[in-house]
Image (cartoon, helix red, strand yellow):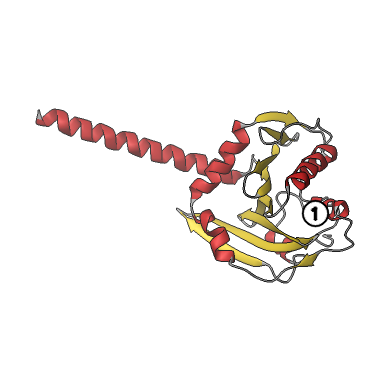
């Protein structure tokens, strides 16, 4: 049985780091604009590429949202424990249907956005977005991840953490500080590879046809 969303997950640990006793959900903002990029499949291709492009470091600790919410959990079960101010978006591109849950929480006065992505109604990707974390706070977040997953305190901007199930964590430290969690073996990414292969074959066939037409006209 699922417990409250913040139980035993990284948000609870972050809250402890800020010496908070609770987490306050914030009001709606422009959710549609935030999620617009996920209407394109190439956004997910970029996620897959990032997982593979970074130096791999392994952990014996399972990578999951919490012991009660793991990859593959059904969206129906997760929605039951989500905050009331949770936005649901659905996208269907080339027959690939996915859903995204998005909400914000306030930690020590700063807003943290949390995305949860579903394929065939099953969780396969989630992401924490710290829009206003200071440089010192970002360093503490990296230390927190290193401690939780029992890995050396490495530069996680160039390393990705993998568990035995090939679930992956990678960090991006730009204008926003983000922590992304991916079930790399999910069928969703296999579906993306099939689409990419199909598009490549179509492109080659089109090129060959144009070349043949040009040759015939000479």
Q: Quadrant of the N terminus?
A: bottom right
Image check: 186 left or right of 21?
A: left
Q: Residue at x 70, y 70 (%)?
A: 85
- Examine the rendered structure and indicate whether residue 190 appears above or below residue 96: above
Q: How many marks?
A: 1
- Examine the rendered structure and indicate whether residue 55 appears above or below residue 121: above
Q: Quadrant of the C terminus?
A: top left
| Between 68 and 156, the one nearer to me in the picture | 156
Image check: 77 left or right of 61?
A: left
| Between 216 and 182, the one nearer to me in the picture | 182
Image coords of residue 105 (percent x, y): 74, 62
Q: Quadrant of residue 21?
A: bottom right
- Examine the rendered structure and indicate whether residue 185 appears above or below residue 75: above
Give the residue at mark 1.
11
| Outermost front residue | 135
Q: Quadrant of residue 145?
A: top right
Q: Residue at x 84, y 34 (%)?
A: 150
Q: Residue at x 30, y 35 (%)?
A: 205
Image coords of residue 34 (percent x, y): 57, 60
Bin the neighbour count of mark 1 within 10 Å (Cα to Cα): few under 14, some 14-19, many 20 and up: many
Image coords of residue 118 (percent x, y): 63, 55
Say what secondary structure mark 1 lies in.
helix
Image coords of residue 28 (percent x, y): 65, 70
Q: Quadrant of residue 122?
A: bottom right
């Amino acid at each position: 049985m699922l417990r409250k969303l913040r139980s035993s997950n990284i948000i609870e640990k972050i809250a402890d780091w800020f010496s908070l006793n609770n987490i306050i959900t914030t009001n709606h903002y422009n959710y549609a604009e935030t999620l617009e990029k996920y209407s394109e499949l190439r956004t997910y291709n970029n996620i897959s590429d990032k997982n593979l492009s970074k130096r791999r470091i392994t952990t014996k600790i399972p990578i999951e949202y919490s012991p009660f919410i793991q990859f593959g959990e059904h969206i129906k079960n997760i929605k039951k424990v989500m905050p009331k101010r949770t936005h649901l978006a659905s996208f269907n591109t080339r027959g690939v249907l996915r859903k995204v849950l998005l909400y914000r929480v306030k930690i020590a006065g700063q807003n943290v956005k949390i995305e949860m992505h579903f394929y065939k109604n099953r969780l396969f990707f989630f992401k924490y977005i710290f829009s206003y974390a200071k440089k010192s706070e970002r360093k503490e977040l990296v230390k927190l991840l290193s401690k939780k997953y029992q890995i050396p305190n490495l530069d996680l901007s160039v390393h990705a953490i993998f568990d035995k199930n090939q679930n992956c964590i990678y960090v991006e430290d730009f204008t926003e500080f983000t922590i992304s969690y991916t079930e790399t073996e999910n069928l969703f990414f296999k579906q993306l590879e099939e689409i990419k292969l199909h598009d490549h074959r179509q492109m080659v066939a089109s090129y060959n046809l144009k070349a043949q037409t040009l040759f015939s006209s000479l």
